[in-house]
Structures are given as C-alpha cells and as structure tokens.
Image: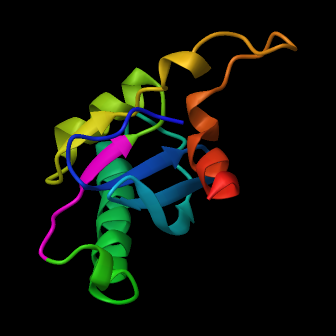
Amino acid sequence: FCESPAELAAVVVSPSTDSTAVCFLSGGCIVGAADLRGWPNDQNNSREITGWLSELQTLIQFRLGTDLAAHYPGANPSLMVAADDDIAGQLAGLSSIPTAPAVLKSEYRTASADGTPVSLSWLVALGAAVN
C-alpha cells in the first residue's frame, strides 16, 4: 500500500496514542509484525519521545537478532513512519536509524467508492491483512 523503500530492508511504524503498529519488510514482503505502546501524549516532551524511540529501537534490534534474523542478514533497515509530518519529523530528528515518511501509492491517495481515501495510519494493518 505504500511506495517501496529504496532499501530492501525496512520497518514501517504507525504510531497512535493507543498503540504503535510495527511492520518488518524484507525485499518488499512483510516478514513480521509487532506492537509497542502508544506515542507519548505530550508531543513536546523530548524525554518521553526519546524513551519511546529507545523502546522502538530495542524492539527492532531484538526481532532482527532473533526470529527475523534470516530476513535481515547484515542489513540495517530504514524506518518508514506512517504518521503526520510532525511525528515523522520528530522521529527523523532523533533516530539513529535512517528515517523517512511513508508515502501511499498514488492509486490509494484518491477517495474510494465510498468517498474515503486510505489513511497512512492504516498502512501496517492493511499490509498485514493482505499478506
């Protein structure tokens, strides 16, 4: 549902206030999924955001070192953020992992038959459902 990353290995993250969906991609295919606590309510509190990012990086490194290791041999995945520009920008500024916003494929940027366009916040769930 989103444009393929230039790198073969990527992690798509969709943070919301309730929880954060995480999707592991390798070679354009979904190879794993996870969830993490929600994005901090206080978006101006850099300490909370840094703590959340540390948890995300720990989760990614754990999964890449255990059950997903065969899909990421020696690869350092990029981070694709399926969220509004403010959150994506904050993560890009703080993360040691190369970070970019997720971009919907052009065919999903327009409204569907019922008038509802696909939301970036649906990317991880849509991909997992299709996979």
Is residue 111 part of the magenta span, yes or no? no
- Image quarter of residue 85: top left
Q: Which residue is at a point 21% across and 40% down the rendered structure image? A: 6
Tell me what residue is drawn at x 34 percent, y 60 percent.
Answer: 51
Could you say where residue 5 lies in the image, as x and y percent from the top left? 29, 41
Residue 120 location, quadrant: top right
Q: Which residue is at a point 29% across and 49% down the rendered structure image?
A: 79
Where 92 sits versus 114, above or below?
Answer: below
Residue 63 in the image, given as x and y percentages of width and height = 37, 79
* Quadrant holding the N terminus: top right
Picture coordinates of residue 83 (x, y %)? 48, 33
Q: Nearer the viewer, residue 75 or 34?
A: 75
Please provide the residue range marked out in magenta.
Answer: 74-80
Q: Position of residue 25 (x, y in %)?
A: 39, 59
Residue at the limit of the structure toward the bottom, as seen here: 66
Task: Name the quarter where the C terminus is drawn.
Answer: bottom right
Position above or below: 42 against 66: above
Q: Viewed as shown, does residue 53 lie left or right of 99?
A: right
Indicate whether 7 appears above or below 35.
above
The answer to whether residue 18 is left or right of residue 5 is: right
Q: Is residue 79 left or right of residue 113?
A: left
State whether residue 59 is above or below residue 6. below
Colour scheme shown: rainbow
Q: Residue placed farthest to the right in the image?
A: 114
Front residue of 113/98: it is 113
Magenta stretch encompasses residue 77: yes
Which residue does the image show at 53% across and 68% down from the upper left? 34
Q: How many marks?
A: 0
